[in-house]
Amino acid sequence: MAELTLNEKRLLAALSKEKKANAVNLACFLNATPEAVVQWAHLAEDKELAKVERIVEKEFEYTEEGKTYLQNGLPETQILKIVKPGTTLADLQGHPAFKIGFGQLRKKGLIRVAGSLVTKNENKSTQAEELALKNPVSGEQNTKDLIKRGILVESETVRYIISITPKGTALVNQGIDFKEEIGTLTRDQILSGAWKTANLRKYDVKKLPKTIYPGKSHPYQRLIEEMRQILLEMGFTEMHGEIVQSAFWNFDALFQPQDHPAREMQDTFYLKEEASLPKGWECLRDMHEHGGNTSSTGWGGKWNPGKAQQCVLRTHTTSLSIQYLATHPEPPVKAFCIGRVYRREAIDPTHTPEFEQLEGIVMDKNVTFRHLLGFLKEFYQRMGFSDVRFRPGFFPYTEPSVEPEIWVDGLGWVEMGGAGVFRQEVTDPWGVKCPVLAWGLGVSRVAMLRLGLKDLRQLYQSDLEWIRRSPVHAPAQTGRKA
């Protein structure tokens, strides 16, 4: 029989009377914390003297919004109640719950809208949702939907039930010695030799200690910092800029025509604010309309200054590159930016409406397309991707253009972004006379490959267990095997 600590003995003595008890109640009786009692119980369980049951219970709380709906009914229920034969949209729009309720009814297929007329779909109701609101059940789909809508908040409570085994009962009946144990020797005990006869606590040197998780930054943030450090070591300067940009800098300055599909509402987040045009904007107008002072013919048509003044959430960090060049038109220039960009994307495992992009530019005399390929290859190899290749691409503001790809075992060649040499139509309005190499690379895609993730959304979640398991350094598992 393995040696018992004094605390294990005290626990078994208490359990011999109760047979089974809650850890909280035992903690009060033993004048200890519940956490300490559970730890002692696990030690006794290892010796088959006690049994520990971990019971997880789900609890639900109503948000302020949820409390209102509990009293008045869900918004869709409130709207559905007033839908009668002949009801029109105008009849419903004055109801306080219309905005949320009407959208939910259409989403769930509970109503039909024909012109301005609104009718109920037969055999459809919100009864199941109302039942979930009044009696939420963990794991039930309607309950999950209510949590997602911010109506309910789910929480977990964990309690431990500790019981004594027949083996533990037999040991207690034989009699337990409650002589005090010494866990730490004092200086006087060592000098006097009292330690020789002391009742020393037994330690199992083979038993693993409790895991301690050190503080560390998020794996995604560590990768971003690694990229930043690589570019700084390669001699680049970091540039910064605002998230809100004018369409002038986000689109027009990059020689993107004003009727380009990427500028439509379905791809871009437009804001109600407007920004004034920078000094010298007329040169850009001329470039779009007829090519300015270059050999280009431009896009033709009439360039609209009003459209260029619209504000957007930047769709790429290339808008910062052209602004940097406008204020630094003389060579040499080596600059980069790692920043968040925004696009109207449906959320799925490989797409989110906001993500990080790595932007870089190099401007100097006599730099060529081959230098661009060299910069990109060097960057990816420093990131741990040994096999890099390039294939031709097309972008409105670079020519020639290229798309870098890296090899990942199990996936093959993976496209990582776009790059090229800025067209003269982009650089000429700002007095830039030297070639400009430019690239925009997907940061989150690199992170997924380095961290071995299948779902992009995990990069933005506060999953403590995943963060704890993630090593501080995760080298890329890439490169074709010989």
Image (cartoon, helix red, strand yellow):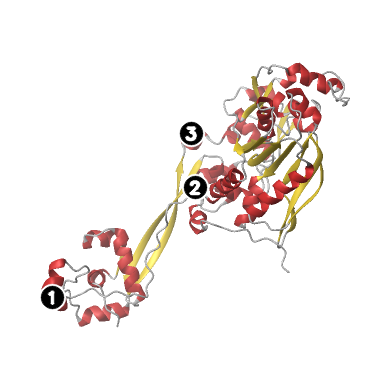
Query: Which residue is drawn at the image coordinates 74% and 38% (left, top)?
Result: 437
Place residue 126 in its image quadrant.
top right
Q: Does residue 194 appear to the left or right of 48 in the view shown?
A: left
Check if mark 2's residue and mark 1's residue have beta carbons within 8 Å.
Answer: no
Of the residues shown, which amino acid type is indicated by label 2? Asn
Of the residues shown, which amino acid type is indicated by label 1? Gly
Local SS, label 3: helix
Q: Which residue does the numbered mark 2 point to in the structure image?
A: 135
Q: Nearer the viewer, residue 115 or 254?
A: 254
Q: Which residue does the numbered mark 3 point to in the structure image?
A: 68
Comes first in the chain, label 2 or label 1? 2
Q: Does residue 49 appear to the left or right of 142 in the view shown?
A: left
Depth check, mark 3 against mark 1: the one in front is 1
Comes first in the chain, label 2 or label 3? 3
* Whole-number angstrom distance, CA of label 2 to CA of label 3: 15 Å
* Quadrant showing the C terminus: bottom right
* Whole-number angstrom distance, CA of label 2 to CA of label 1: 67 Å
Name of the residue lying farthest toward the left:
192
Q: Which residue does the numbered mark 1 point to in the structure image?
A: 193
- Relative to 246, residue 193 above or below: below
- Residue 413 screen position, x and y as percent: 75, 56
- Residue 237 screen position, x and y as percent: 60, 37
Place residue 478 in its image quadrant.
bottom right
Local SS, label 2: loop
Classify 10 Å Cα crowding around label 1: few (below 14), some (14-19), many (20 and above): few
* Whole-number angstrom distance, CA of label 3 to CA of label 1: 72 Å
